[in-house]
Amino acid sequence: MNKDFKFYKKLFLSTCSVSAFTFGGGYVIVPLMRKKFVDELHWMEEDEMLDIIAISQSLPGPMVVDASVLIGYRLAGLPGVAITLLSTLLPPFAILSVVSMFYQAFQTNPVVNAVLKGMQAGIVSIIADVVITDGLKVFKSKNALSICIMVASFCAVYFLNVSVIWMILVCGAFGGVFAFIKSRRGVRKS
């Protein structure tokens, strides 16, 4: 992939800014990445971004790093992986370095504790936005199978306390079977 310096710089800065403002875990990154790479930069389509997020959720390790690496690979191959990996890891490394130097002061500071509590409320609203937005897309697709899987997964995890890991494995198996069936139908039609 022959990309120029401006592209790599923009990729680095974009991923770095997303990483710098992703407080609260992996699900917070979904709307930030969607806004940056789909809405602002138009480097990928909405469905492609959702696929990348879904894959990164099922990979081991931090979802933020996995998603960034997948986006980097999709946009610029191996150089993109190196750029997005570095730009994703730099902000938390810098923040943790500063926090560790002043840990005692932060631990007992009521202002810092209040800011962290406020951030928790913001994180909850961002995650709720992702769930509502993506859930509505499934219902708008009117794909009965997808709707049934989504509702059954929610009920199994929430009401029956089934492990999320089992749900990921079961849904992954369903997805593999249905992709195989769909590909076989395509072969028969040709």
Image: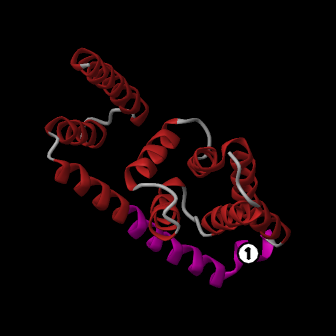
- Vertically, is 14 above or below 185? below
Q: How many marks?
A: 1
Q: Quadrant of residue 115?
A: bottom right
Q: Is residue 87 left or right of residue 28?
A: right
> Could you tell me which quadrant the N terminus lies in?
top right
Name the spot of residue 53 as percent of width and height, x first: 47, 47
For the residue pair 119 and 137, the one nearer the viewer reads as 137
Q: Secondary structure at mark 1?
A: helix
Residue for point 54% across, 56% down = 25
Using the image, determine if residue 3 lies above or below residue 77.
Answer: below
| Residue beneath the point at 27% across and 22% down | 186
Q: Could you say which is closer to the camera, residue 67 or residue 185?
A: 185
Give the magenta range: 103-127
Where does the image place residue 131, in percent across and percent down from the top left?
33, 57
Residue situated furthest right in the rendering: 101
Above or below 189: residue 150: below
57 relative to 29, above or below: above
Mark 1 lies on residue: 106
Image quadrant where residue 132 sits: bottom left
Position of residue 170 measured from the top left corner of the image (x, y, whole percent): 34, 26
Q: Residue at x 28, y 43 (%)?
A: 158
Q: Main secondary structure of the magenta part?
A: helix
The residue closer to the viewer here, 154 or 85, is 85
Q: Position of residue 164 (x, y in %)?
A: 40, 36
Q: Residue furthest front?
A: 190
Is residue 120 toward the left or the right of residue 134 in the image? right
